[in-house]
Amino acid sequence: MQSTWRQLFSDGANTAQTDTLLAPLQQALGPLDQPLPAARARQPELARALLALELPPWLVCELISDHNDWLYRRAIEQALASMQEQGWGEPPVRFCVLVMGSGGRHESLLHPDQDNALILDDYPPERHAEIDTWFLTLAERFTATLDAAGIPFCRGHVMASQPLWRKPISEWCEQMRLWMSMRRVKLVQQCNILFDFVPVYGDAELAERLRSRVLQQVPEAGLFLHEMAELFDESPVALDRFDRLQGDGREAPHPNAINLKRQGLLPLTAALRLLALKRDCPAVGSRERITALHQHGQLGDDLAWRLSRAFENLMALLLRAQLSTEAAGGRPDNWLDIRTLCDGELRLLQWDLLQVRSFQRHVRHLK
């Protein structure tokens, strides 16, 4: 079947044909002023339209995550506008909203939840009650708007509406110093979410100051980094001891289901995160990290190629599974039914997971 893009230079090609080619994408996007729940509900249609334009699935995933960022910005703007109308006034200090975790890596796909935080510029201690109340109100409003739009509250309460995830920049820097000087599983887990952050609204300079502080702390955080590597055991890939595909069975809807995020993507992103920290690499997204580490000689040509192929295929499988679930009337999740894969796809998935496991072992033993 001929690609629809081949029409661009066919005899008699004109603007109308180009418009026809892009019409499904325009329809999937909908009007700019549509309510946020309607915009969020269009994401499966948007993903299908982008795939129909033959974009690689990993890029479609990034664009869907960009769409989530756009929803964040609209929710924050609505919260700011409502506060203005009610007499709260302008923000009392500079601030920056962060999106973290898979959202920060732009890998959240069609099953996102909220992982966000607020960095505030420093202010006098005597103004804490006034200023914190202002930003608590902002955070409660935009997180509630996102929840209503279909990006649900974080079940682990990793949100700017919680004091732990809302504080001035100097307190953020001190918190990271303390967290990274310890070897506690809970602190490592929280840092793993926080390390993968991007600014989504406000003054990005505050976010860059925090990132710089984190990277400066790494040389003194040997025990912390060791604990990060030890936690690889908490997220093994979906292979048994004979290298056969096998899920861990946790909350599985049926015996042939694999949680592709928990047992495929997260082990890879965890290993890339640790290597990026060890090698002073500020990149956040998985593909970004692979590229940056390769360019700076921290990943050889062959390993970078294998990790890129594995990541892109795992993202493609998960996106396809989510779209299939949505088309059947279900809610997109992170489960892959391996019965839907042909023999070649099963073998490729097995190869992908072998690459991830080998890379985990490699990173674990690096100094």
Image (cartoon, grey):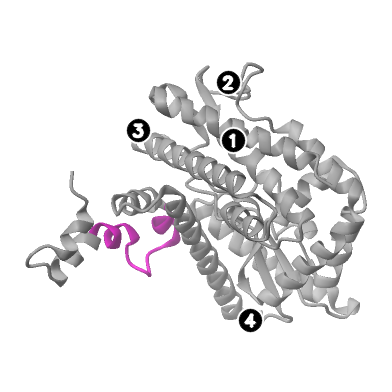
The disc, 1 or 2, on the residue closer to the chain's N-terminal end is: 2
Q: What amino acid type should be assigned to the residue bearing mark 2?
A: Gln
Residue behind mark 4:
87
Mark 4 → mark 1, Cα distance in angstroms = 49 Å
159 or 109, which lies in front?
A: 109
Location of mark 1 (residue) = 264
Q: Which residues are magenta?
A: 23-40
Q: Amino acid at mark 3?
A: Ala
Task: Inspect the image, locate mark 1, and give the three-letter code of the amino acid beneath it.
Answer: Gly
Q: Which badge, 2 or 3, is on the more N-terminal residue?
A: 2
User: How far, Cα to Cα, is label 2 from label 3?
Assistant: 25 Å
73 or 352: which is nearer to us?
352
- Calculate the distance from the C-alpha at mark 1 to the C-alpha at mark 3: 24 Å
Outermost residue toward the left? 12
Q: Is residue 302 depicted above or below 325 in this figure?
A: below
**SS for dot 1:** helix
The secondary structure that most of the magenta stretch takes on is helix
Residue 195 in percent (x, y) is at 73, 56
Q: Residue at left 85%, top 58%?
A: 218
Vertical arrangement, residue 122 with respect to residue 113, above or below: below
Q: Mark 3 sits on what residue?
A: 328
Question: Spatial distance from mark 2 to mark 4, Cα to Cα?
Answer: 57 Å
Point out which mark residue 246 bears.
Answer: 2
Looking at the rendered structure, the secondary structure element under dot 2 is loop
User: Which label's residue is closer to the chain start, 2 or 4?
Assistant: 4
Residue 154 is left or right of residue 119, and the answer is left
